[in-house]
Image: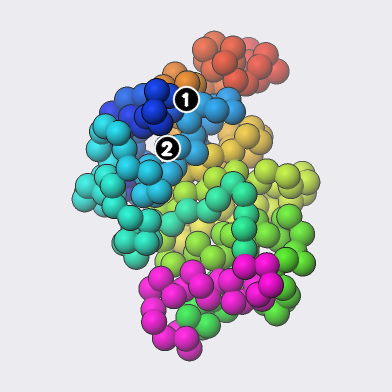
Amino acid sequence: MKILEVQHLTKDFGGLRAVDSLDLDIEEGEILGLIGPNGAGKSTVFNCVAGVFPPTKGHIYFRSEEISGRKPWDLCKYGLARTFQIVKPFASKSVLYNVMVGAFAITAKTSEAREKALGVLEYLNFEDRKDTRAGNLTIADRKRLEIARALATEPKLLLLDEVMAGLRPAEVDEMVAIIRRLREQGVTIFVIEHIMRAIMALSDRVVVIQFGQKIAEGLPQQVAADENVIKAYLGEEYAVS
């Protein structure tokens, strides 16, 4: 069953077309990777799906319901959550406070939000940082906090926007393990990432866009062997012999 369907998605900003008639879909329980050069339109796709920008043209369906133009807070309550490439927690507040903010999307009771937040932190092996000020966290821990805050909303579909950017190799491996565990728990994942060893290892399928248009789609090994993808983005070191 398809949890997300994007049909002919187009997004214009004045005279600039950031996304051009893009089609893609995600099966429930799948991890779909979205890659492409800087400026290809990846984050704009996420912003349209998550309700930050209304599409100029096209349709977006989530759980069989059209959501084109719906507001982010409505989509969050419906089971669609996202992280952001630039992490901006409430720096002066604790980790627990930040995660509770996410939990308030699904409950108005402070006790329930706290219980949910503590459960998420324990799941991510992050409970020992619950009283730490978010502004004092390392980059890796801020990325984990961003995921925790999104998970506290109990998403069915989670959009991850470069959650591994800036991490050391060991931290990347740890984040890959976290994302795999999320899928095992029934969360469908749509992920943008520039770290190719991570995206290729994680994804069931990969979509590649350039100048807002899809230039390839398929299994990771198929995409890595596509001449257009190699020329546009991956480089010869990813060519499959």
Under circle 2, the secondary element is: helix
Task: Say which residue label 1 marks.
Answer: 209
Where residue 136 sits, quadrant-wise, is: bottom right
Q: Is residue 236 magenta?
A: no
Task: Say which residue label 2 marks.
Answer: 45
Q: Residue furthest left?
A: 65
Colour scheme in the image?
rainbow
What residue is shown at x 62% (from left), y 68% (from top)?
A: 90
What residue is shown at x 71% (from left), y 61% (from top)?
A: 141
Under circle 1, the secondary element is: strand
What residue is shown at x 49% (from left), y 34% (from top)?
A: 42
Q: Is residue 71 visible?
A: yes
What residue is shown at x 43% (from left), y 57% (from top)?
A: 81
Can you say which quadrant of the picture contains the C terminus? Answer: top right
Residue 105's tag is: none
| Circle count | 2
Q: Is residue 199 left or right of residue 26?
A: right
Q: Position of residue 95 (x, y in %)?
A: 65, 73
Nearest to the observer: residue 11 or residue 138: 11
The magenta region covers: 90-112
Q: Is residue 107 magenta?
A: yes
Rounded to the nearest angstrom, the CA distance separating label 2 from label 1 is: 10 Å
Nearest to the observer: residue 51 or residue 95: 51
The type of residue carrying mark 1 is Ile
Q: Is residue 173 left or right of residue 15?
A: right
